[in-house]
C-alpha cells in the first residue's frame, strides 16, 4: 500500500504547494494524493505530475497520509523525493 511507501521514504515533501515546487524542480519520484482531499486543491499538483510523467498513487485518507508523514494534521499530497 502507498502508506508504507511514504513511511519507508527517506525524503518527502508534504503539501500541495511544496509538492508543485518540487515537481517543477524535477526531484519527485512518486506523488501520493489523498482521495478525500478537495479536487480543486489537488488538481494542480496532479496535473503537473501527469505533464512530467511522474507516477501518481492514491490513498484513501488525508488523515492517514499525514500520520504516515509524522504530522498531526491531514495531508492532501505528498511527494517522495529521489
Image (spheres, helix red, strand yellow):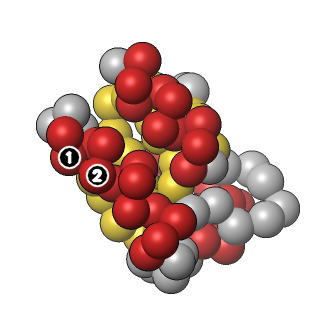
Q: Is residue 1 above or below residue 23?
A: below
Left or right, 82 with reference to 51: right
Q: CA distance from mark 1 to mark 2?
A: 5 Å
- Tell me residue 65's x, y (percent): 58, 63
Numbered circles on residues, count: 2
Residue drawn at x 48%, y 27% as measured from the top left: 22
Residue drawn at x 47%, y 71% as measured from the top left: 40
Residue drawn at x 33%, y 30% as measured from the top left: 29
Left or right, 8 with reference to 15: left
| Quadrant showing the C terminus | top left
**Element assignment for label 2:** helix
**Element assignment for label 1:** helix
Q: Is residue 69 above or below residue 43?
A: above
- Tell me residue 70's x, y (percent): 75, 50
Left or right, 30 with reference to 25: left
Q: Is residue 47 visible?
A: yes
- Residue 81 position by quadrant: top left
- Tell me residue 30's x, y (percent): 33, 40
| Quadrant showing the N terminus | bottom left
Task: Identify the residue under disc 1.
Answer: 50
Q: Which mark is residue 66?
A: none
For label 2, count other residues whose C-alpha is less than 10 Å away and answer few (under 14), some (14-19) or many (20+): few
Task: Identify the residue under disc 2.
Answer: 47
Q: Is residue 15 above or below residue 79?
A: below
For label 1, count other residues whose C-alpha is less than 10 Å away and answer few (under 14), some (14-19) or many (20+): few
Q: Residue furthest right?
A: 72
Q: Nearer the viewer, residue 74 or 50?
A: 50
- Residue 14 position by quadrant: top right
Q: Are marks 1 and 2 in contact (CB under 8 Å)?
A: yes
- Tell me residue 2's x, y (percent): 39, 58
Residue drawn at x 29%, y 43% as measured from the top left: 49
Q: Nearer the viewer, residue 63 or 22?
A: 22
Amino acid at each position: 500500500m502507498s502508506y508504507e511507501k511514504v513511511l519507508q521514504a527517506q525524503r518527502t515533501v508534504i503539501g500541495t504547494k511544496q509538492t508543485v515546487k518540487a515537481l517543477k524542480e524535477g526531484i519527485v519520484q512518486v506523488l501520493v494524493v489523498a482521495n478525500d482531499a478537495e479536487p480543486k486543491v489537488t488538481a494542480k499538483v496532479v496535473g503537473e505530475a501527469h505533464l512530467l510523467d511522474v507516477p501518481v498513487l492514491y490513498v484513501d485518507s488525508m488523515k492517514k497520509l499525514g500520520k504516515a508523514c509524522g504530522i498531526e494534521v491531514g495531508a492532501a499530497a505528498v511527494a517522495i523525493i529521489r
